[in-house]
Image: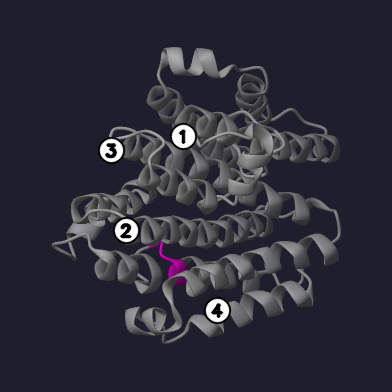
């Protein structure tokens, strides 16, 4: 496969996943702000900027991290490369560049999603309902993945697209957990209280894990159990371990096709091994923040190594 084609597919997967993740972050901030004190609500909106790494760029355009400013910046601002509109636009650009490598159903989903976002501003999103809009973005991402899975040939193109999806998902889940865990934990005046429950429930809901948590643990929502579910549970689709299991499988396919052992295969295997055989007791002993920070750094290094090995744009 040409490196340019692989690059377009890889970033198509990353950008569509990033749009969904941004919608999930905004949704949990919106839900949390509805039941929080004003100072806590401000921290919730600020955490969205912290998770996405856009706090500095946001500060150059806005004086206050409130609902209107953060939603405007993270939904409609095309200059913000992590905004929903910018991600969908770039996903569509990558899809248009490789019309011969994706199916017509995939292109139609991309194009319709892009066209539906045109002209949207804060007032449009507010009028349609914030949660409803964020759910729509998630549904479009689910539809695109479903169409991809159901119509695309299992060749190199499919593997590179899925690789971008799961690498982006792992990075975002780690960022979300790192920022939200430390934001919510000290803010809980009474662990197990009503507000405490809804804050943690909103976090789990943001990664579609609330029902899974109740099924697995069958107990009150506890912060350390939330961390375990989103880090080490391989049966939790958006967990770090589940994401890297998929990456490991995809690299296995690419290794067979290319008959080479690239450095990125080794890096991914090392990360997956630590997740597969890790224990939460050891993670907490070394510091959850330190573990997640190191994971985010290693994931970023893996992305750079993938770009080097397959000559993609970094």
Q: Earlier in the sequence, mark 2 or mark 3?
A: 2
Residue 313 shows in the view: yes
The picture places residue 160, in percent across and down from the top left corner, at: 70, 50
Q: Are marks 4 and 3 in contact (CB under 8 Å)?
A: no
Circle 2 is placed at which residue position?
A: 33
Q: Nearer the viewer, residue 201 or 49?
A: 201
Q: Identify which residue is drawn at 71% across, 55% down.
A: 2
Whole-number angstrom distance, CA of label 4 to CA of label 2: 29 Å
Q: Which mark is residue 114?
A: 4
**Crowdedness near tag 3: few (<14), some (14–19) or many (≥20) residues, C-alpha within 10 Å:** few
The mark nearer the N terminus, 3 or 1, is 3
**Helix, strand, or loop for circle 1?**
helix
What residue is disc 1 on? 296
Which segment is the magenta one?
A: 81-86
Q: Which residue is mark 3?
A: 187
Residue 200 locus on image (x, y percent)? 45, 43
Q: Residue 65's spot in the image, x, y percent?
A: 22, 59
Q: CA distance from mark 1 to mark 2?
A: 27 Å
């Amino acid at each position: 496969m040409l490196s340019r084609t692989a690059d377009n597919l890889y970033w198509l997967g990353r950008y569509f996943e990033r749009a969904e993740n941004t919608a999930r972050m905004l949704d949990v901030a919106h839900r949390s702000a509805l039941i929080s004190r004003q100072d806590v609500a401000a921290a919730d909106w600020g955490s969205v900027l912290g998770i996405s790494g856009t706090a500095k760029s946001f500060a150059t355009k806005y004086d206050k991290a409130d609902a209107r400013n953060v939603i405007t910046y993270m939904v409609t601002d095309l200059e913000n490369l992590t905004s929903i509109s910018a991600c969908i636009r770039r996903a569509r650009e990558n899809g248009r560049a490789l019309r011969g490598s994706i199916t017509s159903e995939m292109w139609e989903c991309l194009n319709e999603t892009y066209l539906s976002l045109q002209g949207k501003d804060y007032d449009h999103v507010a009028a349609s309902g914030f949660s409803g809009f964020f759910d729509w973005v998630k549904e479009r991402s689910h539809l695109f993945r479903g169409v991809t899975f159901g119509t695309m040939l299992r060749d190199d193109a499919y593997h590179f697209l899925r690789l971008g999806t799961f690498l982006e998902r792992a990075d975002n889940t780690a960022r979300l957990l790192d920022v939200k865990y430390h934001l919510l934990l000290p803010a809980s005046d009474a662990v197990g209280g009503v507000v405490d429950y809804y804050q943690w429930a909103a976090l789990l809901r943001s990664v579609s894990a609330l029902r899974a948590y109740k099924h697995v643990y069958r107990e009150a929502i506890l912060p350390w159990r939330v961390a375990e579910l989103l880090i080490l549970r391989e049966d939790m689709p958006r967990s770090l371990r589940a994401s890297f299991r998929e990456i490991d499988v995809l690299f296995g396919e690419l290794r067979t096709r290319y008959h080479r052992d690239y450095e990125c295969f080794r890096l991914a295997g090392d990360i997956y091994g630590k997740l597969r055989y890790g224990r939460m007791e050891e993670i907490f002993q070394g510091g959850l923040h330190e573990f997640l920070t190191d994971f985010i750094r290693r994931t970023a290094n893996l992305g750079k190594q993938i770009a080097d090995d397959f000559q993609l744009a970094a």
